[in-house]
Image (spheres, rainbow, N blue to C red):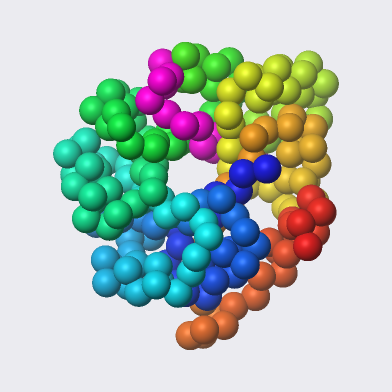
Amino acid sequence: MRIKASRIANLTDARYFAAREVSYLGFCLEEGRAHFIEPGVMRAIREWVEGPRVVGEFEHSPAEVVREAASFFALDAVEVSRLELLPELAGLEVLLRLSSVEGPEAVAAAWAQAQPYATCLLVELTPESAREAMQTSSVTDAWQQVCAQVPVLLDAPLPAEDLATLLRAVQPAGFAVSGSDEERPGFKSFEEIDALFEALGYF
């Protein structure tokens, strides 16, 4: 299962997720966003971790800025939120983020347009749509069908046990989690994410 750790802003998160052998470490490289990481800090973090593919996260930047950042930071992949940018990013490994998705039909429609440019879709669910996917059999079946055909990484705001249940139910290619602030320099609790990995059998 592919796992993406998003919005990494400190070495503590980066080392934790690298030790968990996640597939991707994502860094917000777009100035003005809440989780923006200074280039020097991002470069320093990269020197301390090995294994995951390094992803630059962008939401509003034009394609030329994304390409320049991919080259400057030697990124393994980029994540964007705008479908229309994909043809301009041909040749890069691209993750397309879909926000507040209400159902699997929207995911299938986006994938039909995203091919052949995107590697996978990072799908943000609302709490309501996530619970419906978990609790309503017809919706669960629809998600299973889409996830069997589309490389989907789910990002759902659920407690660890519920998220593990959702992932087992719909069987996506993987899932996304987010970094957070340190409680003090070099220290933070990972109890919630530990619970998720344990529920999924990642020890």
| 57 in magenta | no
| 116 in magenta | yes
In the image, residue 40 lies at what x, y percent?
Answer: 27, 72
Q: Quadrant of the N terminus?
A: top right
Residue at the outermost bottom position: 185
Q: Quadrant of the C terminus?
A: bottom right
The residue lying at 30 percent from left, 54 percent from top is: 74
The residue lying at 76 percent from left, 57 percent from top is: 202
Question: Is 58 left or right of 69, judged from the image as shown?
Answer: right
Q: Using the rendered view, name the quadrant where residue 166 is placed.
A: top right
Between 191 and 74, the residue placed more toward the observer is: 74
Question: Is 140 left or right of 98, judged from the image as shown?
Answer: right
The residue lying at 54 percent from left, 22 percent from top is: 107
Residue range (magenta): 113-128
Between 192 and 45, the residue placed more toward the observer is: 45
Instruction: Work out whether 137 lies above or below 31.
Output: above
Q: Using the rendered view, name the quadrant where residue 32 is placed.
A: bottom left
The residue lying at 59 percent from left, 78 percent from top is: 188
Instruction: Work out whether 35 lies above or below 62.
Output: below
Q: Is residue 139 visible?
A: no
Question: Is 152 left or right of 64, judged from the image as shown?
Answer: right
In the image, residue 167 lies at what x, y percent?
Answer: 74, 39
In the image, residue 86 lies at what x, y percent?
Answer: 31, 27
Question: Is 173 left or right of 96, judged from the image as shown?
Answer: right
Instruction: Work out whether 101 lies above or below 43.
Output: above
Q: Using the rendered view, name the quadrant where residue 151 is placed.
A: top right
Q: Is residue 44 visible?
A: yes
